[in-house]
Amino acid sequence: MKAPVFCRIGFLITVFCLLLAANGATAGETLQIILDTDISSDADDAGAVAVLHGLAARGNIEILAMMVSSGDPYSVSCLSILNSYFGRPEIPIGKVSGRSVRHDSAYTQAVALSAKALDQTGQDAVALYRRLLAPQPDQSVTIVSVGYLTNLNNLLRSGTDEYSALNGKELVGRKVKLLVCMGGKYPAGREWNFYQDARSSRYVVDQWPTRIVFAGFELGKDIITGKRLKELAENNPLRLSYQLHNAFLGRPSWDQLAVLYAAEPAARDENFVLFGPGFNIARKDGSNQWENDSRGNHFYLGLGQSAQRVGERIDNLMMGK
């Protein structure tokens, strides 16, 4: 005997909802996301900002804030101009306080001076994190880090304040659903974002209280994007970033891949393979070692399709297509 049509439809809807839940999304759910970037040393940070705006333009994403983990004095204004160009000048920007990593940039100053930035100074990153996280529903916020882990280290170590009676680690554990971190090399190695501030990297990897998905050096090194950006209008700050960084020769897509995983839950199974669970062991010298362990809350990414196809997807998002 065949089941009534309405029963079969109900079953299919249930299966669909379960699949969405497994990917970290529910039909109609708005993804709350915070980007933490070291925008300065490489143009792929500007590319990651463009990818996030491209995905947000389709709806169901609220960019709560962007944080700068670099000590470059032009990074905040550069990021503000990118956000303004992509139609979201109101996004609050946090900046690292205290000890920070600083490098000369090929593009941040030029982008910062290319137009009027809404936010020239930025807010203290920890205070902004705490102010934004405190009122959010529990386990609702996704943080994607594509730079140094300095801000997240400072957040975890923060105490109670006017925004929350919880300390930093408690606040993160309650409000954050997922941290996607571009950092490390898998199964073992030494990578830029980790070793530039090895102390912060080690503390965050060891102490972060929620699930972490790592996008490693090996994931994006062979996915070269950005060459097509020379086709964009000359007043596009993303185009200027890639032009000044290396004259449109293209760059590996480390940061864009982390954003793609974080901000497009429905396509995770299509684009990526998830390895784990386990523990990522971060060392004092900034290197890391992966250990499989069923008790772990760490995972790392592999590609689920060809590097060429993923690269085309990233380029299209950066081109606004």
Image: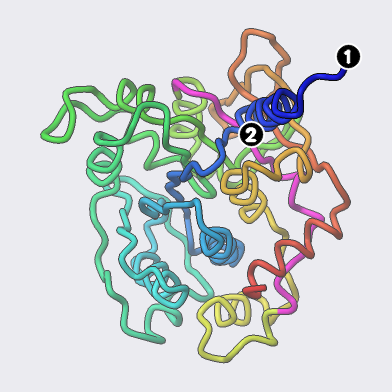
Q: Point out the stretch of residues depicted in magenta.
A: 209-228
Residue 158, located in which quarter of the rendered image? Answer: top left
Viewer-side residue, 295 vs 107? 295
User: For the residue marked with disc 2, what is the amino acid?
Assistant: Leu
Residue at 57% x, 91% y is 234
Q: CA gap, disc 2 to disc 1?
A: 30 Å
Q: Tell me the number on the disc at residue 1.
A: 1
Q: Position of residue 255 (x, y in %)?
A: 61, 53
1 horizontally vs 182: left or right: right
200 horizontally vs 281: left or right: left
Q: Position of residue 109 (x, y in %)?
A: 42, 77
Viewer-side residue, 276 vs 104? 276
Residue under label 2: 20
Q: Disc 2 or disc 1, which is closer to the eye? A: 1
Magenta highlight on residue 305: no
Q: Check the picture and name the quadrant holding the C terminus.
A: bottom right
Q: Tell me the number on the disc at residue 73.
A: none
Work out whether mark 2 precedes mark 1 in sequence or the reverse, and give the earlier one. Answer: 1
Residue at 57% x, 25% y is 283
Residue furthest toward the left?
162
User: For the residue marked with disc 1, what is the amino acid?
Assistant: Met
Q: Is residue 242 above or below residue 197?
A: below
Residue at 49% x, 64% y is 40
Residue furthest toward the top?
295
Mark 2 Cα-neighbour bin, 10 Å: few <14, some 14–19, many ≥20: some
318 horizontally vs 105: left or right: right
Q: Is residue 175 above or below residue 103?
A: above
Circle 1 SS class: loop
279 horizontally vs 252: left or right: left
